[in-house]
Amino acid sequence: MTRYFGSYSSHMPVLLKIMSLTSGPVLEMGVGVCSTIILHYLCMGAGRQLISYENNEKYTRGLMQFHGGFHEIKVVDNWDAIDILKPWSVAFIDHAPMERRKVDAGRLANYAEYVICHDSEPKHDRYYKYSEIYPLFKYRYNYEKLFPHTVVLSNFHCFGASFEI
C-alpha cells in the first residue's frame, strides 16, 4: 500500500491558480493522486486536452480509470522520446528521476506558457538543479507558503504585484 502525505499536494494552490488563468492544453510529467485527478476534472470541465506521462507503471495503475477522450495517460520508457515540443498552456513537472526534471522544464521554456516545477526549495536544488534552468526563463514566481516549494516559470507571462497565490 502506498502512503501519501500532505507534502505530495503542496503544489495544489499553484496548479489551481495557473489553471484558472489559462485555457489551452495541459502537460503533466509525473502522475499523482493529487495532481492527475484535479487536472483531469479541471480539463474535463473546460474541454481541455490533458496528457499525463509517467515512467513508473505502478503509479498509473489506480489512475488509468481517468484515461480516455481528452485525457491520455502514457507510460514512457525514455523521456527523450516523448513529443512535448509543442504549445502548452500549462506544463506540470513532477517526475522521476529527479535530475530529469530540469531537462524537461528547460525543453519546455519556449513552448509552455507556464512551467510549474514541484520540489523547488533551495535546500533540494542539489538534487533537482532547477537553478540551472532559471536563466532560460524571463519570469519566475516562487511559491513558498507550503513545503515542498513550487516554482512557476514563464517566457510569456510576467508575475506582477497582483499575482498572488
Image (tube, rainbow, N blue to C red):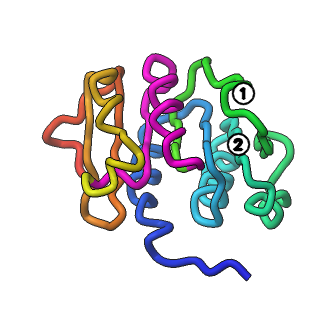
Q: For the C terminus, give its image quadrant.
A: bottom left
Residue 23 in the image: x percent, y percent?
54, 34
Residue of label 2: 53
Residue 141 highlighted magenta (yes or no): no
Which residue is at a point 74% across and 54% down the rendered structure image?
Answer: 56
- Front residue of 46/56: it is 56
**Residue 82 marker:** 1
Instruction: Give residue 119's quadrant in the image.
Output: bottom left
Indicate the amino acid at tag 2.
Tyr
- State yes or no: discs 2 and 1 in contact (Cβ < 8 Å): yes
SS under mark 2: strand
Seen as rendered, the residue at the extreme left is: 161
- Front residue of 119/143: it is 119
Q: Which residues are magenta?
A: 95-121
Residue 69 in the image: x percent, y percent?
84, 41
Residue 46 in the image: x percent, y percent?
63, 43
Q: For the N terminus, give its image quadrant.
A: bottom right
- Front residue of 27/135: it is 135
Instruction: Give residue 100's quadrant in the image.
Output: top right
Pick whichever of labels 2 and 1 is earlier in the sequence.
2
